[in-house]
Image (cartoon, grey):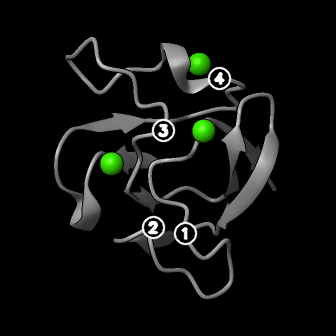
Amino acid sequence: MFVYEHDDYEGRSAQLSGDDRNFIDNYWTRTGASINDNISSFKNQGDQRAVLYSDANYTGAAYSALAHSNDSDLTHNSHNPSNFDNVASSVRFVI
Ligand SMILES: [Ca+2]
Ligand SMILES: [Ca+2]
Ligand SMILES: [Ca+2]
């Protein structure tokens, strides 16, 4: 999945391709800036659902990013935590 710094898939981006327990050492592409607590939109083009967690080690609030889904604004969500903007800190991919 591709994650973006700002709403509407804008700002810097990064790719998440597997389980990752802590975003502190994940950086926006070609920068030294961490994506931790800074993801505001995403595109999940893969066949797996991605569960984003608000805390490291797959803990805290969980946001389910369905396979082949996008979310242009993580601030307002109907079937997930209502505000998941700038909080994601780990991800786990599930079938
Ligand atoms: Ca990491
Ligand atoms: Ca952000
Ligand atoms: Ca967090």
Give the image location of residue 86, x and y in percent: 45, 49
Report if the CB atoms under discs 3 and 2 are less than 8 Å apart.
no
Q: How many residues crowd around disc 3 within 10 Å: few (fewer than 14), some, or many (20 or more)? A: some
Query: For the residues carrying marks 4 and 1, which lies nearer the camera in this image?
Result: 1
Asked which secondary structure carries label 4, the reply is loop
- Could you say which is closer to the camera, residue 46 or residue 83? 83
Residue on which disc 4 sits: 22
**Mark 3 Cβ and ligand 3 under 8 Å apart:** yes
- The tag on residue 55 is none
Q: Label 2 belongs to which residue?
A: 74
Q: Residue at x 68, y 84 (%)?
A: 79
Q: CA distance from mark 4 to mark 3?
A: 11 Å
- Kind of residue sitting beneath label 3: Asp
Q: Is residue 88 above or below residue 48?
A: above
Dot 3 or dot 1: first in sequence order is 3
Q: Is the distance from the Cβ of mark 4 to the nearest ligand 1 atom less than 8 Å?
A: yes
Quarter the C terminus occupies? bottom right
Which residue position is annotated with label 1?
83
Residue in the foreground of this view, choosing between 44 and 60 = 60
Calculate the distance from the C-alpha at mark 3 to the C-alpha at mark 2.
12 Å
Residue 37 is marked as 3
- Mark 4 residue crowding within 10 angstroms, few (<14) / some (14–19) / many (20+): some
Q: Is mark 1 within 8 Å of ligand 2?
A: no
Q: Amino acid at mark 2?
A: Leu
Residue pictured at 48% horizontal, 38% vertical? 37
Element carrying mark 2? loop
Expressed as whole percent of the image width and height from the top left, the position of residue 94 reads 80, 51
Q: Position of residue 84 (x, y in %)?
A: 55, 61
Mark 4 touches mark 3? (CB < 8 Å): no
Q: Amino acid at mark 4?
A: Asn
Residues at discs 1 and 2 in contact (Cβ within 8 Å) = yes
